[in-house]
Amino acid sequence: MRAVDIIQKKRDGIELTDAEISFFLDGAMGGTVPDYQLSAFLMAVYFNGMTKEELKTFTSKMMHSGDLINFEGIKKFLIDKHSTGGVGDKTTIALAGLFAAFDIGTAKLSGRGLGHTGGTIDKFEAIDGFKFPETKEELINMVNETGTGIMGYSDKIVPLDKKLYSLRDVTATVSSIPLIASSIMSKKLAVQADGIILDVKVGSGAFMKDIDQARELAKTMLSIGDSFNRKVVTVLTNMDQPLGHAVGNANEIIEAIETLKGRGPEDFTELVETIVALALQIKGDVSTLEEGKAKVLEAIKSGKAIDHLKAFIACAGGNPDLVDDYSLLPKAKHEVEVKSNKSGWVYRIEAEEIGKSAMVLGAGRETKEDIIDHSVGVILKKKVGDYVKEGETLAIIQYNDKNLDSSIKLLEDAYTIEDREVSKTNVIFEIHS
Ligand code: URA
């Protein structure tokens, strides 16, 4: 078999056999297929896509390129919620309390943030003394004790994805639905879970810029899940503005806590309720989303969700009192209000620009080596559909001594205000299973 013949076949739109895909990807991992051939192959996939059979083999090879994680010692029903990445996405923090309140286990690997979005790991590290498990055994103990265990991604999980992604990044082949779907799903499938909920962000601040693309990605990931007999649900959600009001690290922890106290922003609360209701449906505890959402409200009202979050924080080495005393979290030295220079309705808030305005203050990383300042960030006071008067506050910037001017500029540029009335947008667009 020769790599060049496989590339040619893919280029000409002919379906590849399992043996051909295996030969090619084994060569990519082993170094016998050089990067230039791999790049040509990726471009051929970009143009011609992959059939369901090809995707199954491709994803399986990716998944098996490294370690598979099984949690033999965990007795809970495990749900892995994954988001394709958005600004202000603090969902995993809120789920730590809510899933546990329903005896749904979380045993997942999460990422650090790079670029305009912060990662879950960074956000939790805003809590003084918070330490993530470093071994699988520590993770299992944490899940058994608190219902929730989260640890950083290891290079040993799907190493082939890392290799392919770095080539896609420099060959203009990132935005290929089958390549994105197999990249995400291989990492999800490599880790044991009874159900996978994929939050596919759609909009200017997301990978998927429009609903058609997002639907196609969701369909492809569902089809991969089906090929592996794994239960997958996809939720298409709005990223045409940041999620909730807080963008940063410590401030996102506070917003997630407020949500578990029943005082969260409308859009974020709706997303969290929907995801937990879907998890309850997958587990078989409820038959409709409405029934699930009612249970979520009960868990919030009774204080059960917040108690579970406290237990998780304590188990990870943080001080659980911070849940009732936010002064125990890092606080920026200064705040400045950014005012609107006109009256009207907020038409758009470019999520990516808001993410950048928090990042330049130190809330995110421009390079892998950057150190995060957990105290800084942005609080949006106006969201899409809100009326704002000239001189009224659009957002508050929480800052220390870095890049205030560029943060203000990015924030001002992110807002579009129109003279005509603008309606509020839904956070949940569609659910597919
Ligand atoms: N997220 C991933 O993990 N992979 C992609 O290709 C795109 C987004």
Image (cartoon, rainbow, N blue to C red):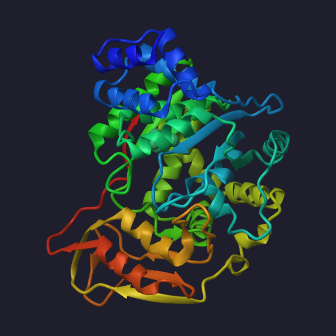
**Residue at x-position 76% and y-position 54%:** 132
**Residue at x-position 41% and y-position 62%:** 242
**Which percent across, then down, holds residue 82?**
55, 43
The reply to whether residue 230 is in sight is no
Q: Nearer the viewer, residue 198 or 133?
A: 133
Q: Quadrant of residue 54?
A: top left
Q: Is residue 287 left or right of residue 236?
A: right
Q: Nearer the viewer, residue 278 or 241?
A: 241
Q: Nearer the viewer, residue 104 or 408?
A: 408
**Which percent across, then down, holds residue 334?**
55, 90
**Residue at x-position 36% and y-position 27%:** 45
**Which percent across, then down, holds residue 367?**
54, 63
Q: Is residue 213 above or below residue 1?
A: below
Q: Quadrant of residue 156?
A: top right
Q: Nearer the viewer, residue 254 or 173?
A: 173
Q: Is residue 165 above or below residue 397?
A: above
Q: Is residue 405 above or below residue 273?
A: below
Numbered label tally? 0
**Residue at x-position 32% and y-position 56%:** 204
